Amino acid sequence: MKIVKLSTIRADVPLARPIRTAIHEIRSVGALLVAIDAGDGLVGEGYLFAPGTRQLGVFEEMVLSFSPALIGADPEMSEALWRQLWGGINFYGHKGVSVFALSAVDMALWDLRGKALGRPIHRLLGGCRSRVPTYASGGLWLGASIDELVAEAKSFVKAGFRAMKMRLGKPRLEEDVARVAAVREAIGPEITLMADANQGFTVEHAIRLGRRLEPLGLAWFEEPVPAYDLEGSARVAAALDTPIASGETEYTRYGFRDMIKAGAADVLMPDLGRVGGVSEFVKVAHMADALDIPVSSHIYTEQSIGLVAALGNATYLEHMPWFGSLFRESLEMRDGMVIVPERPGFGFTFDPDAVERYRLRSP
């Protein structure tokens, strides 16, 4: 089996309504779809996402720059290819766009391997579970009123979720406390609740807020300070009993090694698009497992199911519905758990009609 083609498609996936976090306002999500063709109908698929579409062309050019190294290569030698591409991006840096591109290629290679062998990702990695805990992440945004938060939180419980995440970042600390308290009262003590500050606070504000929130029983307090401030995040983690979750904007095992050394997080959250793909996600999780640190996925819901199912220290799958309409297949959920598909590769394939509907055309 040899790679015969690497191709990309730029897409713009609309959101049901605009969303706001402490640092973002998003009306649609851009996606760069990546396909690696090995002939005989075998195609591995991956993608990258961005808040908006203006920078998708940068992703695309970097991904396509890998073509000379990939065409004619054996896709089952994904670790060798990863290391070859890693060496090739040295000049451009081992963070940022170059690692995004490497991640997309690695995703597609793992999907292709699974399809070629007729095996799902979690079985290629050594399966750990057939159902994975998940939490609702596609709501409870910062722009919602308290009444809207309460109604949406109740709707998640009615839909079968046993865990959910809300966003923080109001100008006054008391507002955030009141919002979390209202959601907790609405869902009761048995439903798991997380809160995400989206890097919006200073260390001092995060500690003050975190202490006020501790009686409300958060499962974690996510990204309380800017992601680059490992020392600040460590100060917050040391000051609070509530676990600190972070890592969605970190790159490769080296970035996570620095996070662990700094004590910057109690829960690591590698993002498939930034961490370096499946290959690096697994390395990060194993490194964390050696220190009894849990991991949780970030976005890329469909592609992360197999990873959460295979890794013993993976606690939650983030259920983000943004990209579900891109795929032929749908998630199956039962009793607050996502059922792990036994289909080959990631188990989710791009729907040509949806791709055509969302495709960005050149002007």
Image (cartoon, helix red, strand yellow):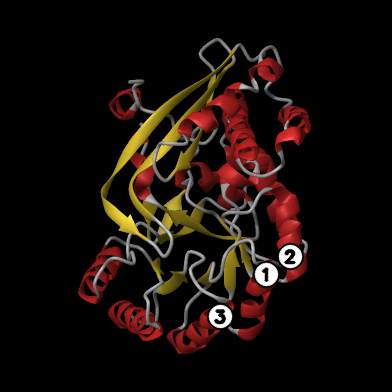
As drawn, the label of residue 242 is 3
Quarter occupied by residue 185:
bottom left
Alpha-carbon distance for marks 1 and 3?
13 Å
Q: Which quadrant is the C terminus positioned in?
A: top left
Mark 2 Cα shell of 10 Å, populated few (<14), some (14-19), many (≥20): many
Residue 8 visible here: yes
Alpha-carbon distance for marks 1 and 2?
6 Å
Q: Is residue 208 left or right of residue 257?
A: left
From the viewer's perspective, is residue 281 above or below residue 314? Answer: above
What residue is rendered at 55% in x and 45% in y?
Answer: 306
Q: Do the residues bearing badges 1 and 3 touch, measured as CB atoms within 8 Å?
A: no
What residue is rendered at 25% in x and 74% in y?
Answer: 150
Alpha-carbon distance for marks 3 and 2?
17 Å
Q: Name the N-terminal-most of marks 3 and 2.
A: 3
Q: Is residue 21 left or right of residue 119?
A: left
Q: Do the residues bearing badges 1 and 2 touch, measured as CB atoms within 8 Å?
A: yes
Residue 163 visible here: no
Which element carries disc 3, helix, strand or loop? loop
* Residue corresponding to mark 2: 260
As drawn, the label of residue 264 is 1
Question: Which is more toward the observer, 67 or 76?
Answer: 67
Q: Is residue 318 left or right of residue 185?
A: right
